[in-house]
Image: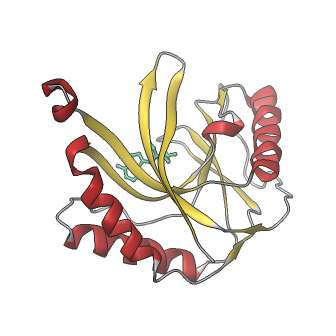
Amino acid sequence: MSQGAADERLRLFFALLPPPPLAAALAGRAAELAGEYGGRALPAANLHMTLLFLGDVGAARLPVLNLAASSAAAAWRPFTLQLDRLGYWPRQQLLWAGLQQAAPELSDFSAYLRSTVEKAGFSIGDAGRAFFPHLTLLRKPGRTPPDGLSLTLPAWPVSGFALLASTRTAAGASYRPLAVWPVP
Ligand code: 2AM
């Protein structure tokens, strides 16, 4: 391995990836919203729900991170999500899909993953930011979307989580799965 590769830093986060039919439906809704309000709709391949954002991590630490995530995966309890809410954050200029009903298994798992990863020596990207489950659909709309936009989608039986690396490009960020943990 070259010195450059050993020193490589990756912008990492753990996320849930919607199954392809749901991702396609979400991307369709995102494109519709971009048609109405402007902005950049995320393509299906980039759609995800962040569980835990780490930020920059040295590539050499990936094996330890993978081990920590595998041990956290053992605590997974199965759950299904219903994405049935659209919201808009004006400061981030971000339109997202989320949940009307809290999903305790999801927030419990995010918290458990966080404590496992912290015990393994990793720091969390923005430790003060509370976990708020959402899936970004659209960035920087030209006009502010109104409240109460509808979202009707099939249920999402969550079947695993992934570790993703984010790369910024001129066309926006793109996300590359580095590892996936299927769960029962
Ligand atoms: P966003 O979609 O709300 O922007 C990759 O950047 C993923 O990590 C995105 O889902 C992004 O959320 C999230 N993310 C980026 N910075 C973050 C931070 N400081 N804390 C928590 N999540 C963050």
Direction front: furthest residue: 1
Query: Quarter holding the N terminus?
Result: top left
Q: Is residue 58 visible?
A: no
Direction left: furthest residue: 3
- Look at 42% across and 41% down and name the residue there: 165
Query: Quarter holding the C terminus?
Result: bottom right
- Look at 65% across and 34% down and name the residue there: 42
Q: Is residue 24 above or below residue 40?
A: below
Q: Looking at the rendering, which quadrant does residue 148 occupy?
A: bottom right
| Coloration mode | secondary structure
Q: Position of residue 109 (x, y in %)?
A: 47, 76
- Look at 33% across and 40% down and name the residue there: 11
For residue 1, side relative to residue 27 (left or right) = left
Q: Position of residue 2 (x, y in %)?
A: 17, 25
Disc count in the image? 0
The one of 51 and 144 positioned closer to us in this rendering: 51
The one of 13 and 2 positioned closer to us in this rendering: 2
Q: Is residue 143 above or below residue 159?
A: above
Q: Looking at the rendering, which quadrant does residue 59 occupy?
A: top left
For residue 22, side relative to residue 171 (left or right) = right
The one of 157 and 87 positioned closer to us in this rendering: 157
For residue 56, side relative to residue 95 (left or right) = left
Q: Is residue 77 visible?
A: yes
Q: Is residue 97 above or below residue 106?
A: above
The one of 183 and 15 positioned closer to us in this rendering: 183
Q: Position of residue 85 (x, y in %)?
A: 73, 60
- Look at 83% across and 34% down and name the residue there: 32
Q: Position of residue 87 (x, y in %)?
A: 65, 53
Direction top: furthest residue: 170
